[in-house]
Image: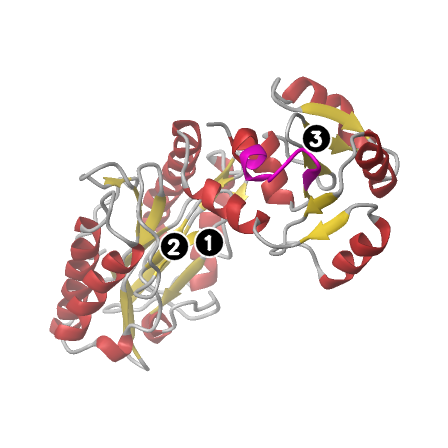
């Protein structure tokens, strides 16, 4: 079933419509990226409502399952359609619409406003990627890999975190990324104990770890990867911690199969780290879905009961962070495919010493 049909099936009757205003969800449903507009779905029709700026481009870009409609004032034009088609209630996205917008919609819309269920339905649909979507995620990942491989040549004692981060961002754009997927995490030494440390003026030193948590965006789709590499040499403790994290990653990876839950994946990584004695130093979830957003459903955590299905793309990113010492995280994205998780990254997870 197509995305539009799934939303039509979600609508209880032909007197109910869905108005999708969230930018990412509009793009997901229509395949068209714009800074404003709405997707209006009723039982029998789907329309992409756009203003003058986007109308011509959308006519050329949007597929046959959705009509492109130019509006002058969105709420007024929607109300005209509601009246003409006898729409009595309208769903909006509770996870996107602000309290002020909700207030406005409740006052301005002729039909009753319904807030429950549409956001969840969209999140549920977006969890399962089509092969076309997976291809874009993989392209984003390949761009990151090319940039990463090249930037390792610059990783030497004396260089700053900032230098590495800026170079990576530059290369990601050179190699075709529309932008970075998030503020790149390029950190070294003691900073690696901060899971979301910010690159600054810290200088790479011999015997330090360097953590890269990096990703690109390609045609709206994100990629996400983390590697921790050593510069010059590693202590026995660094090697030991690296190995615990790698084994946790691999144990979680084995659980990324259709029919298992998000919780199964998290617990596999968490149990290994806890049994190794470092449970208190792993304070985040094992992963998350990736797609048109860098973080989307499901959350890969011990309390999340989402059943993994073919087509889902999730990360596996356990870590251990020893305060004032160092941290290690190893992350790849995996496509759920029956019994065999597909690793979307093509970069070694073994410890490399540069
Ligand atoms: Mn991640």
Which residue is found at the position 46% from the left and 45% from the top? 124
Whole-percent x and y of residue 62? 64, 22
Is the residue marked 1 within 8 Å of ligand 1, measured from its CB? yes
Q: Which residue is mark 3?
A: 48
Front in this rendered view, residue 332 or 208: 332
Left or right: residue 48 versus residue 240 is right
Whole-percent x and y of residue 125? 47, 40
Query: Magenta stretch?
Result: 7-18
The quarter of the image that holds ligand 1 is bottom left
Number of residue marks:
3
| Of pointers 1 and 3, the one earlier in the residue sequence | 3
Which residue is found at the position 13% from the left and 69% from the top? 240
Is the residue marked 2 within 8 Å of ligand 1, measured from its CB? yes
Whole-percent x and y of residue 291? 46, 43
Labelled pair 2, 1 in contact (Cβ < 8 Å): yes
| Of pointers 3 and 2, the one earlier in the residue sequence | 3
Q: Which residue is mark 2?
A: 288
Name the mark nearer the viewer: 1 or 3.
3
Q: Which residue is mark 1?
A: 295
> Does the magenta-highlighted stretch encompass residue 328?
no
């Amino acid at each position: 079933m197509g995305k539009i049909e799934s939303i039509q099936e979600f609508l209880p009757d032909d007197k109910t419509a869905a108005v999708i205003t969230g930018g990412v969800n509009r793009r997901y449903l229509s395949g068209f990226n714009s800074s404003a507009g709405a997707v209006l779905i009723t039982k029998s029709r789907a329309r992409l409502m756009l203003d003058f700026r986007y109308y011509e481009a959308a006519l050329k870009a949007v597929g046959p399952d959705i009509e492109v409609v130019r509006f002058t004032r969105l709420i007024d034009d929607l109300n005209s359609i509601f009246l003409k088609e006898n729409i009595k209630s309208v769903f909006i996205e509770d996870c996107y619409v602000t309290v002020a917008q909700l207030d406005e919609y409740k006052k301005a819309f002729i039909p009753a406003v319904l807030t429950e269920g549409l956001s969840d339905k969209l999140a549920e649909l977006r969890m399962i990627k089509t092969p076309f979507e997976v291809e874009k995620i993989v392209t984003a990942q390949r761009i990151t890999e090319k940039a990463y491989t090249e930037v390792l040549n610059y990783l030497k004692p004396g260089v700053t975190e900032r230098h590495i981060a800026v170079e990576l961002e530059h290369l990601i754009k050179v190699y075709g990324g529309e932008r970075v997927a998030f503020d790149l995490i390029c950190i070294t030494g003691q900073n690696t104990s901060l899971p979301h440390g910010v690159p600054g003026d810290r200088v790479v030193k011999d015997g330090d770890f360097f953590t890269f948590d990096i990703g690109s965006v390609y045609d709206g789709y994100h990629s996400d990867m983390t590697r921790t590499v050593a510069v010059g040499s590693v202590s026995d403790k660094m090697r030991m911690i690296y190995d615990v994290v790698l084994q946790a990653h691999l144990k979680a990876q084995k659980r990324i199969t259709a029919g298992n839950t998000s919780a199964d994946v998290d617990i596999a990584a968490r149990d290994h780290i806890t049994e190794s004695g470092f449970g208190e130093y792993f304070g985040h979830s094992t992963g998350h879905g990736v797609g048109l957003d860098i973080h989307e459903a499901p959350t890969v955590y011990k309390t999340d009961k989402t059943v993994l299905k073919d087509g889902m793309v999730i990360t596996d990113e356990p870590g251990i962070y020893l305060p004032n010492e160092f941290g290690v995280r190893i992350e790849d994205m995996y496509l759920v495919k029956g019994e065999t998780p597909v690793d979307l990254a093509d970069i070694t997870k073994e410890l490399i010493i540069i």
